Amino acid sequence: MLPTVDSTVSDRLSDSAVARLVKASLLVLFSYILLANAWMGDDAYITYRVVWNWVHGYGLTFNPDERVQAYTHPLWMLATSAAHFITREFFFTGTALSWAFDIATLVVLMRWARTGPKAAVLVVWLLTSKAFVDYTSSGLENPLSYFLVALFYTRYLDRPRGAVADARELRAYTFMASLVFLTRPDAVLLFAVPLGEMLWQVVRRRPQRAIVPVMTGVAPAVLWLAFATFYYGFPLPNTYYAKVANGIPKLMLYQQGIAYVLNSISHDPITLGTVGLALLTVWRGDAAGKRATLSAALYVAYTVSVGGDFMSGRFFTTPFLIAVMAVAPSAAALSAPAALAALVAYNLFMPIVPIKTTSRYESAWPWRIQNGIKDERGSYFQGTNVLFFSPFRALPDFTWVREGTSFRNGTEKVSVQGSIGFYGLYAGPEKFLVDRNALSDPLLAHIPASPRLPFEFYAGHYFRDLPEGYLESVTENRNLLTDPQLHEYYDAVRNVTRGPLVSASRFRDIVALNLGRYRNFHEQVLKRRAVDLSIRADNERFSTDVGDRDIATGSLRATGRAGYLQFGPGIPAQPGRYRARWVGSTDSLPGLSLGYVEVWFGTERRVARAEVVADAGRPDHVLAALDFIVPKEGVDSLEYRFFVNGGVRMALERVELYSGPKIPQK
């Protein structure tokens, strides 16, 4: 008689085999979708230039002669450095490194899900989000963030209800938070609520037991901050200071942050929709799920508060991952087939989803309508997707790669650029790049953005005007700034970033820059800076009711109807004395009334008005000028307007704004 196998054991073995097959299939599906959507962004190459310099003995620098932390993600930079040290290549290495961390993330998640149906719901849900898949590659730190978030929350969400963290747990959780801080400093908010709750429980009972575990856990972050302060002169990345010291009013940042949310909802609704679903459903679940979801919502709120970003959806990917972890297991437990069917239907009916990406994919929407929030993958996909490799075509195949290569072999030593990644790596270490957006520039990062910024505003691109003498200073490697205040500040910056690492004067300047009289230097500059603006009348920030835009000449031409030829732009203004001027031409007879000009604070408060009369004798073509004063509290929305009378024929060419000593004498 043949031996028999217990049917329960047989079923269990069969279920295990099916689960393994499902999970393996999900990894294959993910790998295909990653490759189909893979790309490499310009910002990644900023880090790659630092890595190249370090591996080749130039130090952890962007410009070898200047110690500046031009990257936001120290841990990702170190991982990339280790990989590049082996391969001596970036494009394929960066894609492979991203894939490895992404696969590690899915393995952690699927082990946590345990069953095949739960794993399937979890992974398919993630692969349905455009934002999540977009940043599984790109060369940025998101894959490492995914991995650390998965490690943290797979452990945290399985904690017994009401459990109090012991020393080992507290050390482990704070250590993971420390690593995610090193991956991206603001990402520590993703763990804020769970960590706060655990620390509160421990401190409330026996506070002394929290000291050693917490100090041990945060040691990596503390050590890096100490190193960064010593080596670079500042504890946080230069990119942080470039974004904080921009001089943009908080209200404008909040408004742009809301636009970032709406952009995500418009083009990729499942990403923030999942966060919203988690907020609505987890209140009936356990406390761990609530705290996880609150952390996700906190990071979304933080993203809004800093003005969002120009990369659509990028900063919602990790909150989305946490939200999926909070709701997908429950959805699978209720009905895995129904959940999968809903996800499949979403992929069928939504026009922009990762599974539908083909070789023809390109930028998917007109990004200018929301101040530069764009499909970053679409912008680079055609020249950086790994599947497009072929003989005689080097990847990345991009304009800035060719421009950087030309600059490398030219005679010029210094170049001013707004995009420094591809260009910078291919320019080579002997060339110096001045970054107008200040991501790699230690002086520009600490002065406010250009007064022209509202007229050329793109999210995340806070360009600076170069101080007089700055290019000469960089070229000759000495301080030639003409402004006394900037000259003094730049002396300290140069000592910290270019001087000997160990010197008493350098340490004094580090203290002054971070804690002393230079700590809020951008505010000091903003208060005394005069405005000197001359903007084409057809600039998109100016609205018109009775004008035709002439793109060739940059002018607004009156149509003959009475009304506002120009109004707007609703920009912030510091306190002080101002003059607005309107420059153009008219064939009206001298002495004829053309209309009037006005200045408004917001849309409800008119503060100045003057009639405009034709004057053929003005050689500078100034049609009108109006003086006004902005009160000491400043204004968030300044509008200057030109109302034309009916029948007037006029071409408004430029609209000017001056303040303080920049006001023209005549």
Image: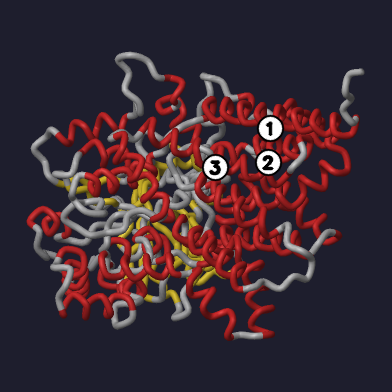
- Residue at the (39%, 44%) spot, across then down: 43
Which numbered tag is attached to residue 219? none
Q: Residue furthest toward the front? A: 1
- Depth check, front residue: 579 or 268: 268
- Label drawn at residue 110: 2
Q: Earlier in the sequence, mark 3 or mark 1?
A: 1
Q: What residue do we see at 43% from left, 43% from top?
A: 538
Given the image, on which type of amino acid does mark 3 rest?
Ile
Residue nearest the observer in this picture, 662 or 166 = 166
Placement of 54 over or under 177, stated as above or below: above
Q: Residue at x 36, y 74 (%)?
A: 523
Disc 1 residue type (three-letter): Lys
Question: Of the residues shown, which amino acid type is indicated by label 2?
Answer: Met
* Residue matched to label 3: 369
Q: Quadrant of the C terminus?
A: bottom left
- The Cα–Cα distance between marks 3 and 1, rounded to whole angstroms, is 41 Å
Q: How is the image coloured?
A: secondary structure
Residue 268 to residue 514: above or below: above
Report the side of 158 relative to 633 (left or right).
Answer: right
